[in-house]
Image: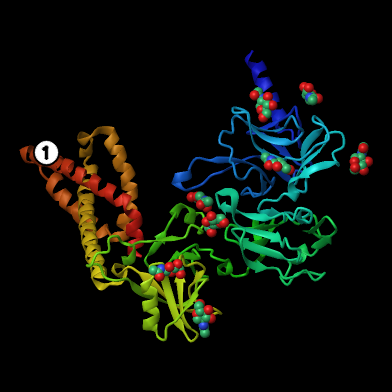
Amino acid sequence: MAPLAFLLLLLGQTLLCIAVDTISSTTPLSRNQRIVSKGKKFTLGFYSLQSNTTSSSSSSYYIAIWYTNILPVTTVWTAATDVPVSDPTTTVLVIGSDGNLVLLDQSRNRSLWSTNVSVPASNSTVAIIRDSGSLDLASASNSSVTYWQSIEHPTNTWLPGGKLTLDKTTGVSQRLVSWRNNANPSPGLFSLELDPSGTQQFFIQLNDSISYWTSGRWNGNGFRFPLAPEMSNLQFVDNDDESYFHYSMKDDSIISRFIIDVSGQIKQLTWMEISKEWVLFWSQPQAQCEVYALCGAYGSCNSNGTPYCNCVKGFSQKIQNNWDLQDYSGGCKRNTPLQCQTNPRSAHTQSDMFFAMEDVRLPDNSRGAVATSYQECQTVCLKNCSCNGYTYNSTGCFVWHGDLVNLQEQYSGNGGGTLLLRLAASELSDPEKSKTAIIGSVVGGVAAVLVILAIVSLFVFRKCRQNKTLQISGGALTNLRYNDLLDDIQSIDSLLLDLSTLRVATNDFGEANILGKGGFGMVYKVQINHAICIIVNFIYLQMNMYLVSHRESYLTGNK
Ligand SMILES: *[C@@H]1O[C@H](CO)[C@@H](O)[C@H](O)[C@H]1NC(C)=O
Ligand SMILES: *[C@@H]1O[C@H](CO)[C@@H](O)[C@H](O)[C@H]1NC(C)=O
Ligand SMILES: *[C@@H]1O[C@H](CO)[C@@H](O)[C@H](O)[C@H]1NC(C)=O
Ligand SMILES: *[C@@H]1O[C@H](CO)[C@@H](O)[C@H](O)[C@H]1NC(C)=O
Ligand SMILES: *[C@@H]1O[C@H](CO)[C@@H](O)[C@H](O)[C@H]1NC(C)=O
Ligand SMILES: *[C@@H]1O[C@H](CO)[C@@H](O)[C@H](O)[C@H]1NC(C)=O
Ligand SMILES: *[C@@H]1O[C@H](CO)[C@@H](O)[C@H](O)[C@H]1NC(C)=O
Ligand SMILES: *[C@@H]1O[C@H](CO)[C@@H](O)[C@H](O)[C@H]1NC(C)=O
């Protein structure tokens, strides 16, 4: 019986391993199953994006297409990007009753995504993954008849052979849309599309509204951006129904893709088999800080910074998690409300002050104001609570109402100058500074005492450990924890000072006082030692726990 079951299992495994490239009405695709294109170039299946951030540690599944032989997994298309698959055990990708390919949540009989096209007859279609990287809804009797192709509905990747189309009858332009962040493929803020008004040029837009980059008009040979030589087969097709761009590779063996990434740049990347990495051929806009409002409200971009984005003085990140995943669009929030925002206005609080940010790219949407000096310009700004900053240059006085966006530091180009940023007085005044300095030194002092105590107890602890007196103080569990902690503490103590000289000193102390004597005196000493060890162990454990949990800040603090 058992061998038979084993054989069946083996057979099942083998069947699973046979590469199939088709989903039909009778063979849906469920989790752990994949279909692979005939030439094995692309794979379609459920793909899980593991996010490192603690708040979103639960993994979401997406239907995705990726390169079969490239690691780390590089996706080229994802379905249902608005809705991750919450329960992959009950969700299948299947040819639905109307002939469309449907991502079906069976537990709720709910469609999460569908190809949503009209098909001549139900039961007559199959879905096929092709070596081009496209998932096609095709006729079951003739697979070269297709009703829908994923390559013509790209997400963030434009593959060779794919089209970016402007449908002239509907005026809808097929857009390439960035991921929300590096762990979330749902539609983000940046998109590339053909100008819907038919000017034959590409735009990159923020949030579907602000264009911050344009390719320039197609002139029959190319755009003003330099195309990588491998991609030179870019073609423009214009007919009554539609106009579109498509490209192909000169050499099919070159693996190349074109993406719009989470930081708002379009990029062409080519896979280098020798070094096993994606190599960037070009990107537009060339400078990261040219991406409009990349750092969100009150964020400022620094092209030499890592990361590129930082909050301006007096502000901090709104959503730290998203910043970690390179989505800065959430921007920054004020740490201390302005005086004019606090209610009721207290006579004791100082009026708001201004912090000078020199050599910045000034925010957009300035308003001219009437003033003949810095002082007057400042007064104009102070009078209105929605004014967050001003500048006074040779053209005159300009103020900003509402959020400040598109700031860049260390900037010397057009539209640069000195921004006077409005902040609560406490963010700038001296008493506050000295207060933080005092707090800082108190914290520092306490920490130093703790470190010294921990080091002293470390020596006594090691002595105790050598004499195996530990066993009486808490059994195996305690020992285990001590050993774990010891590894941690060693990396800290090696950093703090050279222990070897001190270690020698304590050994000398130990030999002379414990091992050298006998009889009543020794028992007495051992008992005293036990008592001391128990107390010291306790202190030591507390110190270690504190140090280990604060190790990160010590290391960075010491830098
Ligand atoms: C997740 O963590 C690993 C190792 O800790 C790191 O290599 C990887 O880049 C991280 N991924 C993200 C999306 O932060
Ligand atoms: C599932 O929903 C479809 C329409 O949305 C309906 O035709 C079908 O009968 C439902 N199936 C079950 C088992 O409820
Ligand atoms: C399917 O397409 C029709 C029109 O073509 C549209 O009205 C409908 O909202 C679409 N449904 C989905 C689920 O996208
Ligand atoms: C479609 O095919 C399935 C399986 O062959 C069959 O059970 C079903 O009746 C067919 N439906 C139609 C509308 O032909
Ligand atoms: C399949 O469809 C294509 C395109 O319509 C056609 O050229 C071809 O002859 C068809 N093949 C068969 C076997 O019907
Ligand atoms: C994007 O636009 C929508 C509506 O136009 C708006 O509600 C949203 O706040 C905008 N998001 C950003 C980050 O600008
Ligand atoms: C402040 O400025 C805003 C925007 O210009 C304006 O709508 C508002 O009326 C002003 N408030 C005052 C008190 O002047
Ligand atoms: C002064 O600043 C305003 C606001 O940013 C800007 O529009 C103007 O060009 C600047 N003038 C000069 C001479 O830099």
Percent of width and height locating residue 385? 38, 67
Question: Is residue 539 found left or right of 118 in the rendered image?
Answer: left
* Residue 400 locus on image (x, y percent): 46, 71
The type of residue carrying mark 1 is Gln
Q: Label 1 neighbourhood size at 10 Å, few (<14), some (14-19), many (20+)?
A: few
Q: Nearer the viewer, residue 287 or 256?
A: 287
Residue 46 against residue 374 in the figure, above or below: above
The answer, for residue 338, to whether it is visible in the render is no
One can see residue 334 in this view: yes
Quarter holding the N terminus is top right
Image side of residue 207 versus residue 39, left or right? left
Vertically, is 429 above or below 104?
Answer: below
**What residue is pinned by disc 1?**
527
- Going 34% across and 49% down the picture, which residue do you hit? 488
Instruction: Say whether residue 48 is left or right of residue 483.
Output: right
Q: Position of residue 311 (x, y in %)?
A: 43, 64
